[in-house]
Image (spheres, rainbow, N blue to C red):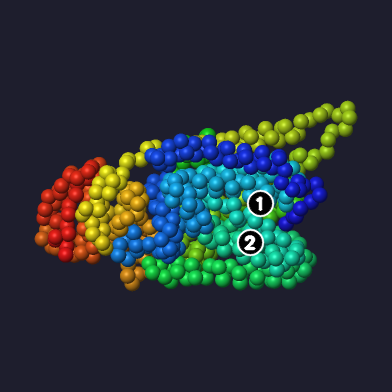
Amino acid sequence: MTDSHPGRPGRWALADSAIAAGFLVFTLLLFSGLWSDLGHGYLWNGGSDQNLWEWFFAVTAKSLLHLWNPLTSNLQDYPLGVNMMANTSMLGVSIPLTPVTLTFGPTVTWAVVLTGSLAGSATAWYWVFSRHLVRHRAAAAIGAGFCGFAPPMISHANAHPNFVAWFVLPFIALKVVKLAKGERPVRDGIHLGLLTAYQIFLGEEPLLIFALAFAVFAVCYLLQHRGDVRAMLRPLGIGLGVGAALAFVLVAFPLWWQFFGPQSYQALEHGPSGNDAAAMTRFATQSLAGDPTSAADVSINRTEENAFFGWPLIVLMVVVTIWLWREAVARSLAITMFLMAWLSLGATLVLAHHDTGVPGPWKLLADLPLFESVLESRFAMGAVLAVGALLALATDRVFAAPVPLPGAWPLPVRLLWIGAVVAVLLPVAPTELIVKERPPTPAFLADGTWRIYVGPGGTVVPVPLAGSGESEPLHWQVDAGLEYAMPEGYFVGPSGPGDKRGRYGAAQRPTSSLLDVVRQTGMAVTVTEAQHQQALDDLRYWRADVLIVVPREHDDTFRTTVDQLVRKPGQFVDGVWMWDVRTITP
């Protein structure tokens, strides 16, 4: 735990601005495809999630505009609604960026949040490293650059802005260190409380991962400085108490709403989701040395490539650990790196799909509150921070090496080290994120034709209904100005009225499940009288006024099935097949 030093940079200078600008320019290049086509661009490897996040941003903006409660919305899963606080709606950015969303649309907000989060995270780590860890800006920039643009960060940048928004976390760590040093515990406690509360509105899961990594580091460091612990207790007690009290005041009601409010849930179980150990040495899909097939073989999907450090970096970290082992900070970082990586492997060690049966520390945490909802593979992101800090420390030690005496052979140590770092990091360097054009919103929705058929309190039912694999209806709803509600949807909520287990999407009605069978098989079903009557019950429950089928894959089978379900043929109106069901669902 180090602090500012006369040899380190002081106030923000031109060189710092140049480094921060470099991070921003690099981030803009990564997202250049998105920025160049904000009207139609879609981050392809993100699956359904860009539509979801744009929906979050748009709904929050509309709620603020109309002075509605931003912690809930009934625009999805009508009539039950969605608990926005229990979802990753990132109120910490969606609320302050409401003017941007209302003026330019949620896609611009999406691009701003992703770009600002990546560049901001790298810049934040640079500030903390350069002022409190190392003396040379170049060393801090290398470490911070890895923290900001490591393979897991780029993987999540396709779909999860909450997992790339780490720009507050470095300052939380810094405030805890300052408290331990006894520097104005009340003031620093207030700052810590504010930062923690804000981070909760950015992302709770990254906060949990970071807190665990920092706790491991702190324990390792303090065990080597036992004599200093007694002096730290009083300022830490004061500061942490003040911070906890302030954070509680700020977040108590939103957290109550999240865990106990309408449509809340208690846990979201994913099943075993640890990293395959082989993922540690392979290269991510969107890295210079990446092989999509090799990466997909040992990852959940393109947005969850949570390791992929590459074997050269693993070798370098072993060398750096041995080299700097005598330094307390480096030793603590190395232990943190190892434990967080091991934790991310899950309950047992799996190597290239082979379960070795070797137990991991995740078994100790898997069933604890909060941890039970986390994908354990994501704990490798805690190792990312330790790797970045070790890179900064090692580079700083090389740059601090004595200059050769006159007449001695001038071995270019710095140049050799930088060359080695470039050779190691270049294979995991990120490539531009893939952007493709998404289908346009049907005119029936975008141009407002739906208003002819939907009365107050009525809903539009897309067929198939929106869900985790069918998020386009969210985009259509946003393009229609969020002026109609729809049943079910893509979000996280309870498994049923009396079942608080979390699940992706709504607890499906029988008719929705039937339409899912059509989507999965591509074949129409022969509807029975009982299924027809059930459809009428479900349409009444959803308060449906109109059903729509958009011309695309399997649209003929959906049309045939819906014709049977409602016992009337659909009409083709402004680019969609439409069934007005107001007369049969009074």
Q: Is residue 273 left or right of residue 145?
A: left
**Front-most of 287 and 296?**
287
Q: Give amino acid for label 2.
A: Ala
From what the image shows, is residue 115 above or below residue 482? above
Q: Residue at x 70, y 65 (%)?
A: 187
Q: Which mark is residue 215?
A: 2
Tag 1 residue:
334
Q: Calculate the distance from the C-alpha at mark 1 to the C-alpha at mark 2.
A: 14 Å
In the rendered image, the quadrant that contains the C terminus is: bottom left
| Res. 2 image quadrant | bottom right
- Is 171 on the left-hand or right-hand side of 428? right
The one nearer the camera, 315 or 399, is 399
Q: Secondary structure at mark 2?
A: helix
Q: Residues within 10 Å of mark 2 (few under 14, many from 20)?
A: some
Image quarter in which the N terminus is found: bottom right
**Where does the image place residue 199, in percent across and percent down from the top left?**
56, 59
Residues 12 and 104: in front is: 104
Nearer to us in this view, 412 or 349: 412
